[in-house]
Image (spheres, rainbow, N blue to C red):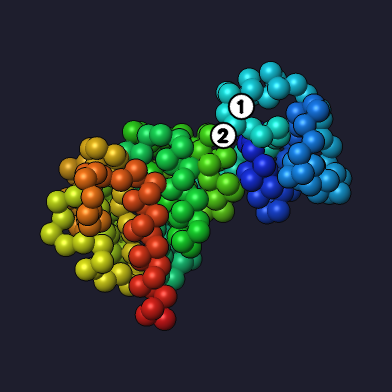
Amino acid sequence: MSEIIYGIHAVQSLLERNPERFLEIYMLKGREDKRLMSLIQQIEKMGLTVRVTTRQWLDEQSEHGVHQGILAKVKESTQYQEGDLPTLLEQTENPFILILDGVTDPHNLGACLRSADAAGANMIIVPKDRSAPLNGIAKKVASGAADNVPVIRVTNLARTMRLLQEYHVWIVGTSGDAEHTLYESQFKGALALVMGAEGEGMRRLTREHCDELISIPMAGTVSSLNVSVATGICLFEIVRQRLATK
């Protein structure tokens, strides 16, 4: 099985981490900007062949995504399932987990992945249904994070949350009507942050399985933030507190 990635950052990241996954690499004929040519030189130094093609072909293969003149067919990445979770938890001391409940936009999924990777999250859990696919769009926005942080798709999110609690993971959910804010909570030890969908928030059953609910204080006229922005804010407040306790 193979999959497609595109965009300079996504290709660059995979080249640095797993060059053996590349099957075919294509670049736009006539495009010679510095960033792209620097990447092409790195690719060729590693003995990989780059084929030249048309913008129309790249547009079609990327489903009209922003490919920046480069696209690659690569071996499929590791697909993590619900059954892999116990092993991952046992291998990780004080796991830091992001759970996305109902994020259906691939751009938002990719941005959340990127923030989770930057924050040092150990894994990301998403439901198999009612969740954005980890496609070329999400991987481009993620800029390599999708290949660095395990993304685990689960069939039953509530059951998965109960499993996390059995492993002594404290689950913090985000809600606009929570009794205290992100900055009034203490984050330490094994922790999972749950982010819900824009507008709807977490589903009822997901909310009921949280150990704690927090909100982001809002001072302006807007009532909510983009889910990827809210995710970044929460993740890095957790990082700040975890670093302060070391």
Q: Residue at x 64, y 22 (%)?
A: 59
- Seen in the picture, residue 206 relative to 5 is either above or below; the reply is below
CB under 8 Å between discs 1 and 2: yes
Up/down of 119 relative to 47, above or below: below
Identify the element where label 2 is drawn: helix
Which residue is found at the position 37% from the left and 34% from the top?
104
Amino acid type at image mark 1: Ser
Report how far apart the C-alphas of labels 1 and 2 lie in the structure: 7 Å
Which labelled disc corresponds to residue 163? none
Residue 190 image point, x, y percent: 35, 68
> Mark 2 sits on what residue?
136
Residue at image x 48%, y 43%? 110
Q: How many marks?
A: 2
88 relative position to 56: left or right: left
103 or 92: nearer the viewer: 103
Q: Residue 154, percent across and down?
A: 38, 43
Q: Which residue is mark 1?
A: 62
